[in-house]
Amino acid sequence: MSEFSYRGDAAFQRPDAAAADAGSRYVEAVYLRTNPAGPHEELWYHLFGCRSWIKVRRDTRTHEILAVRAADAGGSGS
Amino acid sequence: MSDSRGRISRQQPNRLQRLGVVDRSQPLNFQFDGRRYGGFAGDTVASALLAAGVRLVGRSFKYHRPRGLLTAGSEEPNALIELRGGARREPNTRATVAELFEGLEARSQNSWPGVGFDLGAVNSLLSPIFVAGFYYKTFMWPAALWEKLYEPLIRRAAGLGRATHEADPDSYDKFHAFCDLLVIGAGPAGLAAALAAGRSGARVILCEEDFILGGRLNGDRQLIDEMSGRDWVWQIEAELRSLSGVRILPRTTVFGAYDAGLTGARTYGALERVCDHLAVPPAHRPRQRLWKIVARHAVLAAGALERPIVFGDNDRPGIMTGAAVRTYLNRFGVAPGRRAAVFTCGDDGWRTAADLKHAGVAVEAVIDSRTEADPALVRAAELGGAQVLLGSQVVGTAGWQRLSRITVRGGGRTAQFSVDLLAVSGGWNPNVALSTHLGGKPRWSAGLSAFVPGDLPRGMSVAGACGGAWALGDALREGAKAGAQAATAAGYAAGSIPSWSCAGERVGLTPLWHVESSTGKAFVDFQHDVTSEDVALAAREGYRSVEHLKRYTTLGMATDQGKTSNLNGLAIMAALTERSIPSVGTTTARPPFTPVSIGALAGPHRGKHFRPTRLTAGHDWAKERGATFVEAGQWLRAQWFARSGESSWQETVSREVRAVRAGVGVCDVSTLGKIDIQGADAAAFLDRVYINVFSSLPVGKSRYGLMLREDGFVMDDGTTAQIAKGHYLMSTTTANAAGVMQHLEHARQILWPELDVQIVSVTEQWAQYAVAGPKSRELLQRLLGDALDLSDGAFPYLACAEFSWRNVRARLFRISFSGELAYELAVPARFGDAAIRAIMSAGASLDVTPYGTEALGVMRIEKGHVAGNELNGTTTATDLGLGRMMSRKKDFIGRVLAERPGLTDPERPALVGIRPVDGSARLYAGAHFLQIGATPSLENDQGYLTSVALSPMLGTWIGLGFLRRGPERHGERIRAFCPIRGGDAEVEVVSPVFFDPQGARLHV
């Protein structure tokens, strides 16, 4: 266990469950992910601390952290 | 010298009296392969062996050829030894970096019966079949032979040391450190960088893998400001130690470059070998320490490694790199031979010849593959008595356990020299590894004939030989500049940059990778026995990409990761395929730079310390009652409470079950996750995370809920109670408590931040006890008195209440896992011990019986309640028989994907109860279901048993499991087959509710 734990792609949004094509939209949202080599918006959980979910913009090639903000804060980066 | 009967000999025939910085006032004794030797403090195992005249230190990996020392550093491919004995035995230790200590014991590896006479050497005679790709080609078919024959054969033949099977007796430590500048390597460039930054006040950490600072200055005889290199190092080290912001870490290897945060400060991993130079770490001292260093800036001053030249029989003991020869002479005061020759393709080899002469070793010949060399160098060598052969190459060597002769060809002539030492200088390879750990590619420098660091990670600069600045003066200048720049960038006032003067040097080189005209095996990778012929075979068979070359030939794959071999292999491949070296490319270097022990990575988190052990408030009480505990996540829970006279745990558990069903029992359920949920939208929030509706739950009531993951599979279950308007208390399974909390935080913060809801884990804040059985109401009435009306009308099934009891806020829930009339009483954890003792005394005349998780498990199986074995991440609500709970009137997490065809397929195995037809037959969890008469096979598999118990109420084994179309098959007989534990029983499919199917016992 460590201070932060990784969840993955921050782009996930729940599609409208009432939509006619909800099934295929959910399959896409839950299972299909882009895996870019470069900057990537990710969700991390600050487990041993404030229990905040944070959005981290990280370069997957170099593991450089480019921006961090609270996930429920809106806006783009700090 | 020692003799074959192991008589003690501490003579050091090859020790030079005038040279070296070993401490001759501290003689040390050690053993190698059972023989005793002597050395001095400051020696490595390698230098002490060499001083004693031992040249043969190991056998090669594949051909079991005799091998000696090739290098004097951490890149050593040959001299891998088993260090220490017993629980501290450590294989694959490099003799070239293992510091000598009194009583050290080491053994050679990969030879049987001994390094001098090795039966495996017969592999050399079979070498035509041991070529590249041999394993792939030979051990392909039939596959069934892999496990039984091929793998054990390969493993026995390919020994790279034996690890101990005993537990590691030493401790390991972890440190975090922060600095403005991390200097990697304390050679001339690194020392200059550390000093320049340190003088300005910057916080500096200087890491050096060696046990003394100085790098090449220890092995070479250059002067700085008219001082010997050693004196200069001492002077700089003394000043660095006087600076409060500077921390010097010798015996510390920076092995990896990692992530960088928003400030640009980057994290580096380093391993400090705190006590590896001692026989046994002193009390309270770790053996090794793992450093996590966060540095604003790092100067990579890791130096360069000299590369060998590939020629026939270039692996005989006595053939080593020129730099290693100089290090043994000048630092350790050891002559690696009596009659030497030098084989070089650049000016550096001539320095080795001069140092040999200076140490009094006869230099028979200097062989330079270049047709021209500086006349001054030539004259100096000739004056020393050496024969100079320009435009010449070593084409062969002789001698089995040590070098005895070399054959030189050049200008159409062939000459032979009787020598026991050949110093080889193929040029230098910068230690670029740390510059590439984050994806950067090294850049080929045609001028230097070497790969140098290319695109550097942010916050890293390079100084000295690591960047190709071979000359000492350049290394000092670059180091001082890099250190000063880092300090200035970190906000420290720029002082004057230190500078030193030293003589100019010749660093000319015309690379020679491979002597093509030579005969015999020409080794590229010494540690994995990869020859130039193997590289050629790979090229012929089309494995031309550098990554394919590596995997096909195993070039560069051993513990040394090809530090002395990768570039030579690339160059040979480039020549064979008529490409340039950079177009062949380089393989990717990944951390660690040198091996890091698992013990250091684990640190103190071993055994019971791997994670915390959590005890409930009632733990001491349970211990007093003789409980046997079981680990449940991090918690210790009472598994059962044995009484004297009980002969087996099953007897105990059956007694506990009967006591609950007939009277009253008490069980500590504090470990179940408890999450406090409040807010105006709390009910709406619960509706979205549970499959069933919670917004209709009145205050003062509990409800069982099931939650799914978004992919439609079941995540967890538990009850949630509304104890006051908008104030809910959710319970989770013990194992999933943290995961559910994270899941809910995700839902609250990311999916629906607009909801007014707050959540907090209160698992640790409340102690909770289940009081179960027909007499549970009576017990609680005695306990609670007037605090609460417990009549069925006032406090019916699923009721909950928060109330004041003896001036303590308490909560009571009428919920049941056992199927009996039952309550759960919760009190703040600090009153938990008092509460359980109060329950016991209130129930004394009712014969209240403490029960553990095992009895709890038996009772829930008797009732068909699902638990962790069934909520295993692959089951749906319908699989669990709970599909009807899924509300059609609302959206909830997992709703859409739970309706996927694959998850609603009626063929899916679903929950059933199982009873053996023969009442005495035993069931095994994990058994698979087959139709009677069907062959056990994957195609015929019908499902599996998840939970079993010996039911005291039914008198037989019972089980829960998932059976294809199970709910339609009650009454059918099938087979429960468990070949692993020998279980094979004919069983009847029944309802999962074995006991009190009407639930009458709940509502009394």
Image: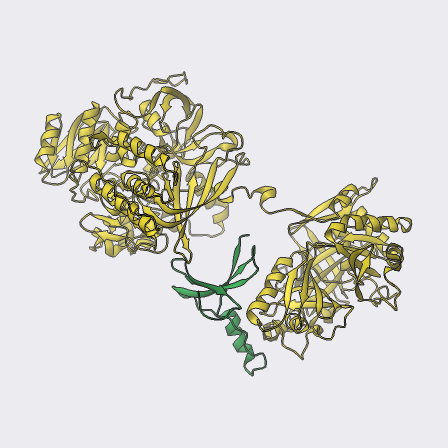
Chain colours: A green, B yellow
Residue located at (74% from left, 48% from top): B638
Farthest-out residue, right: B845
- Which is more toward the observer, B157 or B766? B766
The reply, left or right, for residue B974 in relation to residue B398 is right
Which x, y percent locates residue A62? Answer: 38, 58
Residue located at (36% from left, 23% from top): B40
> Can the viewer see residue B318?
no
- Which is more toward the observer, B232 or B43? B232
The reply, left or right, for residue B336 in relation to residue B27 is left
Question: Which quadrant does the C terminus of chain B fall into?
Answer: bottom right
In this view, B5 is above or below B837:
above
Which x, y percent locates residue B225? Answer: 21, 33
Which x, y percent locates residue B459? Answer: 34, 53
Which x, y percent locates residue B296? Answer: 38, 51
In this view, B335 is above or below B324:
above
Residue located at (54% from left, 77% from top): A15
- Which is more toward the observer, B884 or B941? B884
> Can the viewer see residue B411?
yes
